[in-house]
Amino acid sequence: MPIMKKRPDKELVEALSVHAGLVLRTAARVTGSMAEAQDVAQDLAEKLLRRPPANVRSWPALLKTMTVNAAIDRTRRRREISESPEPVTQEGPEAALEQEERAAALHRALTQLSERDRQLFSFYYFADLSHADIGRQLDMQTNAVTVALHRIRQRLGKILSENYAQNQMEGASS
């Protein structure tokens, strides 16, 4: 008996088509590479077509969330095997190196936050979700999201300042 292939859900195919730009921009922001972003988008589409989600309230929110998570996973795997993607910037190698160093410092600072705070930060800054969309995703009031993001920015600023000061002291002593 031949294997029957399930036809893709029309709603899913339409959502992937309509929000393809959103997925690519989000993935490029997280990975820092358009080639990596295209790979993330391809992987995400394949995953969704294999197992379509049921009862989606907001396709943009779902796709942004899944894209951020997939891009972070891909970036993590790339770092583990120490590959470097081509930078998105067109400003030259010095600017690309500086951007990479800032991204690495932010990544280290983010690891010092709670999982919930990292998720809030990622949704807002990497996935461009509104406070209301984040609230719906995390079952929070919009005002609570605003306050939480403010406190997260303050914590990150303090962590980054402390890390910078520590790196300056280590650099001066060597």
Image (cartoon, helix red, strand yellow):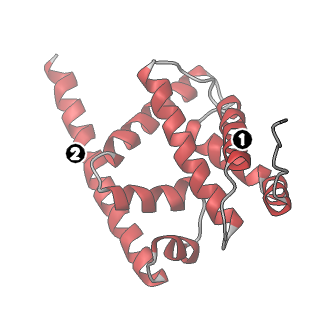
Q: Which residue is mark 1?
A: 46
Look at label 1 and name its amino acid.
Glu
**Quarter of image, res 85:** top right
Categorize mark 2 by other alpha carbons within 10 Å: few (<14), some (14-19), many (20+): few
Please state, as top left, top right, bottom left or bottom right, where the N terminus lies in the image.
Answer: top right
Give the vertical position of 25 relative to 95 (above or below). below
Please state, as top left, top right, bottom left or bottom right, where the C terminus lies in the image.
Answer: top left
**At 26% across and 49% down in the image, what residue appears?**
159
**At 70% across and 29% down in the image, what residue appears?**
35
Between 146 and 40, the one lying in front of the other is 40
Give the vertical position of 55 relative to 173 (above or below). below
Q: Which mark is residue 14?
A: none
* Secondary element at image label 1: helix
Look at label 2 and name its amino acid.
Glu
**At 46% across and 38% down in the image, what residue appears?**
103
Categorize mark 1 by other alpha carbons within 10 Å: few (<14), some (14-19), many (20+): few
| Residue 104 pos. (x, y %) | 41, 34
3D distance between C-alphas at marks 2 and 1: 42 Å
Give the vertical position of 151 relative to 111 (above or below). below
| Residue 24 pos. (x, y %) | 72, 45
Give the vertical position of 124 relative to 146 (above or below). above
Q: Which residue is mark 2?
A: 162
